[in-house]
Image: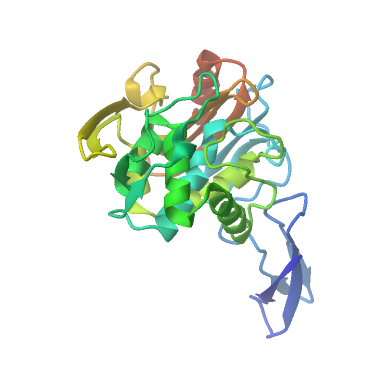
Amino acid sequence: MFLILAMSLTGCGSTKYDMAYQLNNDVSSFQLLTTAKQETLEPFAADLCVADKDVSAAGVNLSDVGSAALFDLKNLDTLYAKNVNEQLNPASLTKVMTALVAMKYGSTDQILTASENVLVKEQGAVLCGLKPGDQMTLDQALHILLIYSANDVANLIAEGISGSVEDFVALMNSEAAELGATNCSFTNPNGLTEEGHYMTAYDLYLIFQEAMQYDLFNQIIQMSSYTTTYKDRNGAEKSVDVKNSNQYLKGTYEMPPNVTVIGGKTGTTNAAGHCLVLLSRSSAGTSYISVIMKDTSGDDLYKDMTSLLGLAK
């Protein structure tokens, strides 16, 4: 399947080229930098950070992580990259895509009703404790999804937006392809381990950056906690009080000097290891997206992320 992108020359002349965009290309950015007869062909990723190879940095040694990257959003520069196009299990980093699709296609005040699919039985899965017939708004669900990473709420959102988890997952994959995130594949909306469910660090950058276009997403990822009430099938109120799993926001780990961690999303399973994507800002006002996937422990994850963010200027 090919998406044909019309690429206009930005230099002299008005010649246009049609470039086949291959959905399964090995490099998600599909970088193209060409000059011909003093005419420059604008690349697909002209307004994005590009990472088609590893980028090392002095003082940063992330030998034990599966994948890592630091993207400078102001200068569109990739300051560090390791295996950013390697397909890895993303765990709950998946929920960034879930939230993006829900914000695009849903209304924050719409009422979601839980079905039997909220009864997630995987041992150790983080759950809000939803029961069939429970109701909450999409706004409430998105807060619980991104702050507490509740897997049952992910299924609630999926069915509320698309009518079924399967149709929602198909929409996740379609929207990812539209963003150029062509090396990821989703089989569920929560990130619990399944064959064929994977993502790359670069795809996550593309997805996270798109989610940042929504004010609600930016608001939620900065919150350290959230309290709300929703209704059960009989109309009785149920209360939920959740804390953010982001250890920088909890104060468990200190942020690097001159860097403020705005917020992000955590993810942990046995298959995925310890994962984290962050939006941060330096004292100079430059914004960064940083990603680490498949680290060896929670402690190592934050130590490695602090080292990575030390590159911020």
Residue 157 horizontal side relative to residue 82, left or right: left
Q: Position of residue 151 (x, y in %)?
A: 47, 33
Residue 313 appears in view = no
Q: In which quarter of the image is residue 110?
A: bottom left
Asked if 158 appears above or below 58 in the picture, the reply is below
On screen, residue 174 above or below 155: below
Scheme of image coloration: rainbow
**Residue at the farthest bottom position:** 14
Q: In this view, does 198 lie above or below 293?
A: below
Quadrant housing residue 13: bottom right
Name the residue at 40% across, 22% down.
247
Residue 228 relative to residue 87: left or right: left
**Above-or-below relation of 82 to 307:** below
Q: In which quarter of the image is the N terminus?
A: bottom right
- Looking at the image, which is closer to me, 150 or 75? 150
- Residue 289 coordinates in the image, percent (x, y): 50, 41
Where does the image place residue 141, in percent across and percent down from the top left?
A: 35, 42
Residue lying at 68% horizontally and 32% vertically, measured from the top left: 56
Left or right: 289 in relation to 187: left
On the rendered structure, is 22 left or right of 258?
A: right
* Point 54% across, 20% down: residue: 301
Q: Which of 108 and 10 is in front in this view?
A: 108
Q: Position of residue 72 (x, y in %)?
A: 52, 44
Look at the image and tell me whether residue 308 can be seen: yes
Q: Residue furthest front?
A: 234
For image coordinates 79% across by 77% down, the residue present is 37
The part of the image, by quadrant, that contains residue 274 is: top right
For the residue pair 232 and 112, the one nearer the viewer reads as 232
